[in-house]
Image (cartoon, rainbow, N blue to C red):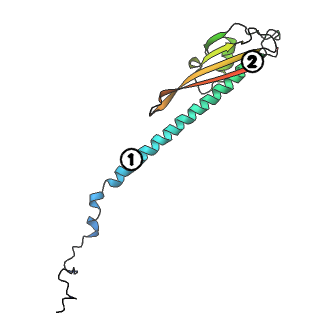
Amino acid sequence: MNSRFHRPNRVTYDTLVVMPLSTRGKDRAGVAAVEGALILSALMLLLFVLLDLGLAVCRYNVLSATARNVARAAIVRGADAAPQLSAWGPTAYEGTAADSSDAAVVASAWLATMNPADVSMQLTWPDGDNQPNHRVSVQLSYSHQFLVSFLGLGTALPLESQSTMLISH
C-alpha cells in the first residue's frame, strides 16, 4: 500500500458518535431563561430611570410655571393695586405653598404634580418697596425624591425656580 495515501487515523461513519436530536442542547436548558431575566432586569431598570427623570423634568417645568404665575399675581398687587385686590409686600414672605397666604393660594393652584406642603416659597421685593416699576422676586424650591436610587446621585434632586418681574400697579 502506498503510504502517501494511507491514513490510519481516518474517521469513518462507523467511528462517529452521533447524538440524537433530543439530547442536543440539554446542557443549555436554563441559559435562555437566565439571559432573559438579566436583560429584562436591565431594561426595566432603564425604563424606571427614564420615567423618574421624566417626572423630575415635569416637576421642574411645573415649578417654573408656578413661580412665573405667582410673580404675575404679585405685580398687579403692588402699592397701587385695584381696590378689590389686596396689596402684597414690601415685607418678605417665606413659607410653603400650603399656607393660607394669598401667594400660597395662587401657587397651590398650579402645583399639579407636587404636594404644596413640600414646596418652599420666598417672595421678596429687591428694591425695598412695592411701588410700580420696582421688582418682585419669587423663588420656589422642591426636593424631588427618586423612585430608583441612582449611582452617586443620592435619593433626592433639589429643584429650584426663580422669577423676577416689574410691578405694574
- At which x and y percent is residue 85? 78, 11
Decide if residue 99 is in sight here: no
User: Do residues under tags 2 and 1 come within 8 Å of each other at their CB atoms?
Assistant: no
- Residue at left offset 80%, top offset 8%: 79
- Asked whether, in this view, residue 93 is left or right of residue 75, the answer is left
Q: Is residue 134 above or below residue 9?
A: above
- Residue at left offset 71%, top offset 22%: 69
The C terminus, quarter of image = top right
- At which x and y percent is residue 70? 70, 19
Residue extending farthest to the bottom is: 1
Residue extending farthest to the top is: 91
Residue 73 bears which disc, if any?
A: 2
- At which x and y percent is residue 75? 77, 16
Sequence-first tag of 2 and 1: 1
Residue extending farthest to the front is: 4
Judge by depth and name the residue closer to the eye, 71 or 32. 71
Residue type beneath disc 2: Ala
- Residue at left offset 70%, top offset 22%: 163
The crowding category of the residue bearing disc 1, from other C-alpha atoms within 10 Å (few below 14, some 14 to 19, many at least 20), is few
The N terminus, quarter of image = bottom left
Q: In this view, does 99 lie above or below 18?
A: above
- At which x and y percent is residue 101? 67, 11
Q: What element carries label 1?
A: helix
Residue type beneath disc 1: Leu
The crowding category of the residue bearing disc 2, from other C-alpha atoms within 10 Å (few below 14, some 14 to 19, many at least 20), is some
Quadrant of residue 116 within the rendered picture: top right
**How many numbered marks, from 0 up?**
2
Between the residue at mark 2 and the residue at mark 1, the CA separation in whole angstroms equals 52 Å
Identify the residue under disc 1. 38
